[in-house]
């Protein structure tokens, strides 16, 4: 059943992408127009989409730092056991 659903969505990839963009636009509009920002703790929280941008940048930084840390010494070369 799940395989059929994945195949169905893969066949309509352009529609799925447009729907995701639409949902994203609706969420940004909701944040900008409807969400109550009177209880914000900082001035940055009053900006529309602040937490979305903050989450995206944080995720990108986590990926970059993890890759850097992995290449720094955690990852062993493929011929590690051959030596």
Image: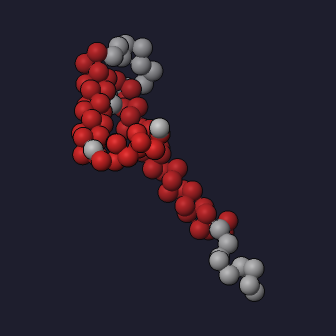
Residue 43 pos. (x, y %): 37, 26
Judge whether 6 appears above or below 44 on screen. Answer: below
Residue 22 pos. (x, y %): 25, 33
Quadrant housing residue 6 = top left
Residue at image coords 30%, 47%: 11
Residue 76 is left or right of residue 44, and the answer is right
Residue 11 in sight = yes
Residue 28 in sight = no
Residue 33 pos. (x, y %): 25, 18
Q: Which residue is farthest bottom?
A: 83
For the image, the number of numbered tags is 0
Residue 37 is left or right of residue 26, and the answer is right
Residue at image coords 57%, 56%: 66
Question: Which one is nearer the viewer's eye here, 18 or 11?
Answer: 11
Color encoding of the figure: secondary structure
Residue at image coords 29%, 30%: 23
Residue at image coords 46%, 44%: 3
Figure quadrant of the C terminus: bottom right
Question: Which one is nearer the viewer's eye here, 61 or 42?
Answer: 61
Residue 38 pos. (x, y %): 37, 13
Residue 26 is left or right of residue 3, and the answer is left
Question: Which one is nearer the viewer's eye here, 65 or 77?
Answer: 77
């Amino acid at each position: 059943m799940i395989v059929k659903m994945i195949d169905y969505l893969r066949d309509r990839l352009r529609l799925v992408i447009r729907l995701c963009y639409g949902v994203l636009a609706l969420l940004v509009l909701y944040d900008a127009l409807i969400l109550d920002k009177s209880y914000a703790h900082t001035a940055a929280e009053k900006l529309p989409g602040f937490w979305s941008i903050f989450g995206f940048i944080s995720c990108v930084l986590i990926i970059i730092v993890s890759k850097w840390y992995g290449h720094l010494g955690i990852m062993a070369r493929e011929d590690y056991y051959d030596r």
